[in-house]
Image: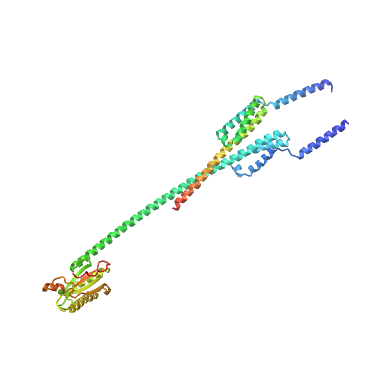
Amino acid sequence: MKNRKSAVSILAAAVLAAACASTPVSTPTLDQARADFVSANNNPQVGTYAPMEFKQASEALDQANQAAQRRESLEDIDRLAYVAKQRIATAQEVAKAKAAEANIADASRQRDQVRLEARTAEAERAKRDAEAAQAQAQQAQAQAQATMQQNAALAERAAQLEALLNDIQAVKTERGYVVTIGDVLFATNQATLNPNGTSTLRKLADVMSQNPNRTVLVEGFTDSTGSASYNQDLSQRRAESVATALSQMGVARDRISMKAYGQAFPVASNDNAAGRQQNRRVEIVLSNEGAQIPPRAAMR
Amino acid sequence: MNKHQTMTGLRLSCAAAVLALTACASPDKAPATADVAVSRNAVENAVSAGAAELAPAEISAAREKMVRANQALAARDYKLARELAIQAQADAKLAQSKAVSAKATAASTQLNEDLRVLREEVDRANSQ
């Protein structure tokens, strides 16, 4: 009886022990700590930045695991597991902080780099701007000089023209310079130019060749002696003779216009010989630069 | 085995048991006191790192355990005082590391943003 009782209790104990051995002891906190440990172990930052804290966490977890293996009270296992869990979390936080600090250092370095590059770029821009401004100034100076030279050349040409026109006694009027080929430059009652007339025209032809943007209008006049038709014809022939002479001296025909006025537009009285001689004339109007010659105003 | 021998054996084993119990139940007072002091220090460090604002749950857990550890010291339960001190230390260290990482992360995020803005500005300046 007594023996049997003890046998039963021994058997029960064995069964109980076997049951206990087959189901390992754990607590929710220990399970959590183990899961946290796995994710910390898989986080490369933890290995890099918090090796010491992770080692302490591993040791704490080992203690909790050993307590579980030794089947200590659930309360003790839980307590050790709690410490392990907090230390694992600490290792994760330390790693996070160190990684952030590393990023701060890297970002600061990059910021300095960007600032340096920006300053360099700015300096280069400023240099480029300065060079451009200098080039512009030089260009402006060159242009001013060119303009000055051009103006000087123009002035010189104007002076030359003035001198030439003075030489052939041209008179400045609203229509342009007027060169008068007087009666004395023609053979008497003829349209033929004498050498003096030709020489005057040659000087005018020179002016024409130096001033390609100017044209001439050749106007013929007579005194009132004789019939109007005869005078018209004579003034026509004399104007033509002048135009032909100019074109023979190299002035293009299309730069020469012609007009015969006969006894119209006398410049002096026809009552005396001197006046009549003044009225027998050919007037050559030299146009202004690039301008049309305005028509002769009404009878004077 | 006579009755006297049995009694003697019983006395001996009782004495041994009592000794063993006192050895286990009351470890030295000094290490427990030291542990509590270290934990108090850890809590203070965590607070000065800004844990009160940045890890309030952990810091209040640590403080609550410190109160209980001090109570255990007063009650001469040195084993409990040590256990609580160790847990309070783990809580305090986690609170401190959370505070530090929160600050570092914020600073890092801010700096990354500054860098992004700076790059944009520089790109704008360069494209003009």
Can you give x and y, in whole percent of width and height, for residue A253 in the image? 26, 74
Number of labels in the image equals 0
Can you give x and y, in whole percent of width and height, for residue B74 in the image? 64, 24
- Which residue: 87% across, 33% down? A4
- Which residue: 64% across, 43% down? A39
Q: Is residue A191 in view from this perspective?
A: no
Of residue B4 and residue A43, the one placed in the foreground of this image is A43
- Which residue: 20% across, 69% down? A178
Can you give x and y, in whole percent of width and height, for residue B76 in the image? 66, 25
Q: Which of the 4 image quarters holds residue A184?
A: bottom left
Can you give x and y, in whole percent of width and height, for residue A176 in the image? 23, 67
Relative to A300, residue A66 above or below: above
Of residue A263 and residue A106, the one placed in the foreground of this image is A263
Q: Which residue sits furthest top?
A: B4
Q: Is residue B57 in view from this perspective?
A: yes
Of residue A244 and residue A206, the one placed in the foreground of this image is A244
